[in-house]
Image (cartoon, helix red, strand yellow):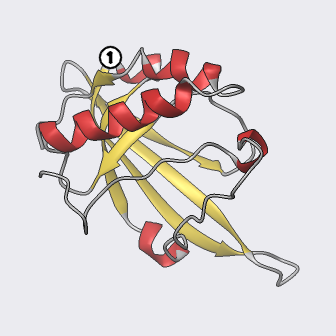
Amino acid sequence: MAPNATNTISINPPTRFHPPGPKLVAPPPPPLTWLERTWNVTHSTLPMWKKAKNVRITYKILPRDDGKGCCLEDEVVYDDIDGKPEGCFERWLGMRQIRGVDCEGREGLSAGLYEEIMRKLEDVGELEGCEELGKIVKGMFGVKIDL
């Protein structure tokens, strides 16, 4: 997929790292319901996926007990690299921190789209305060999918 005026990728650093001057105007995020489905991990920096294939993450919106907002539950299912099915595990957003980047898609990524995402992540990683992202992105690798 070639980028054009109506189809470009924009990745901005966290607002605390924005330089002084004009503020970037980010497009509104998609609604959480957009995330609520199963995604295939196509590329990652997380070492745990080097020995895995068919990594799928399903996000589910959960109402909070206090009625204010919601939480996200994620269920991760994968096979080991030899094809033996592994169990699944569930985590709630915020319960543990993993430093890494996953590229996910419902049907995978084209080589061109992946390259554009990587260029944008590398650009952000060169900004002052975002060097850790730059280091993490250098470890990106493809995750095998053979569903």
Q: Residue at x 25, y 69 (%)?
A: 6
The answer to whether 139 is drawn above or below residue 99 in the figure is: above
Query: Disc 1 marks which residue?
Result: 51
How dense is the environment of label 1, judged by Cα within 10 Å: few (below 14), some, or many (20 and up)?
few
The x and y percentages for residue 35 are: 45, 66
66 or 24: nearer the viewer: 24
49 or 23: nearer the viewer: 23
| Relative horizontal placement of residue 84, taking residue 134 as reference (left or right) | left
The x and y percentages for residue 46 are: 47, 23
The x and y percentages for residue 82 are: 19, 18
Quadrant in the picture for residue 125: top right
Of all residues shown, which one is farthest toward the right? 66
133 or 140: nearer the viewer: 133
| Relative horizontal placement of residue 41, taking residue 115 as reference (left or right) | right
The answer to whether 128 is drawn above or below residue 9 in the figure is: above
126 or 100: nearer the viewer: 126
Q: How many marks?
A: 1
Q: Residue at x 42, y 15 (%)?
A: 138
| Relative horizontal placement of residue 2, taking residue 52 as reference (left or right) | left
